[in-house]
Image (cartoon, rainbow, N blue to C red):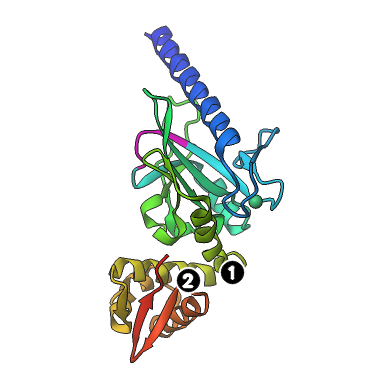
Amino acid sequence: MRFEFDEDRAEYESQQQRVRAWSEFWVAEHMYCPACGSASLSKHRNNRPAADFYCAACAEEFELKAKNGRFGARIVNGAYATLLERLAADDNPSLMLLGYNLSRLAVERVIVVPRYFFTPAIVEARPPLRPPARRAGWAGCNILLAEIPAYGRIDVVIDGAAVPRDTVLERWRRTAFLRDEKMPSRGWLIEVLRCVEKINQSEFSLSDVYAFEGELQAVFPDNNNVRPKIRQQLQRLRDSGVLEFLGDGSYRLIEK
Ligand SMILES: [Zn+2]
């Protein structure tokens, strides 16, 4: 039994390695830098723990996650503690998700998420591994993809068709106002943006956003001025070209 198990595992691991090699080849051949438009990305030669590719022109780094089929609400990531440390130090890479069809060996979906959309609120701890796992006690984590604002999930390939490069670059550029924000102010902007998206109307009112007061209070338990914070974020989102103010407490999301 033991021997069979190990054989299965070896087969699984070798398939994973083949898929990995093939995905990396695809990125090296076809992917440009979504941050600056440079024609190609370079593979890190050394075995860096998270970053797989980087842009030689703008130094943006990317972690590649490849999956057969569609991406669900969660993306399996590495060690929980390591990711939280990286977020606290602001040195996590941007994420590149590559969805392939294994039977056709075709890439059907590519999504990039700029690194500054990663906050502790979108990381979910997985239960620690238990004996007899080789790494018993080790705790991994999931990235809650569905919790990242749609603004920060930038499509590069949809249903096997490339999104025009200019559209991708423009969408990345429009997120750049978050790049130099530190936590927790970046977290506030992202959370309020997420609330605005959840309203799911191009025009909305201040009271529509206030409806999320309890939810925001839960994310920021130490803050006792949630409504003023909401108004402040809406102003900052307006200044960054995400919203426009229509007057009388009405707002409009500027179309992408
Ligand atoms: Zn670049």
**Crowd rating for badge 2 (residues with CA inside 10 Å; few <14, some 14–19, many 20+):** many
Residue tagged 1? 181
Q: Do we see residue 149 in this rendering? A: no
Residue tagged 2? 189
* Residue extent of the magenta highlight: 66-71
Q: Is mark 2 within 8 Å of ligand 1?
A: no
Q: Mark 2: which amino acid?
A: Leu
Q: Residue at x 70, y 33 (%)?
A: 46
Q: Residue at x 54, y 52 (%)?
A: 84
Residue 148 in picture, x, y percent from top left: 42, 57
Task: State how many labels appear.
Answer: 2
Decide if residue 104 is on the left or right side of residue 33: left
Residue 170 in picture, x, y percent from top left: 52, 60
Q: Do we see residue 240 in this rendering? A: yes
Query: For residue 3: magenta?
Result: no
Q: Residue furthest bottom?
A: 248
Helix, strand, or loop for circle 2?
Answer: helix
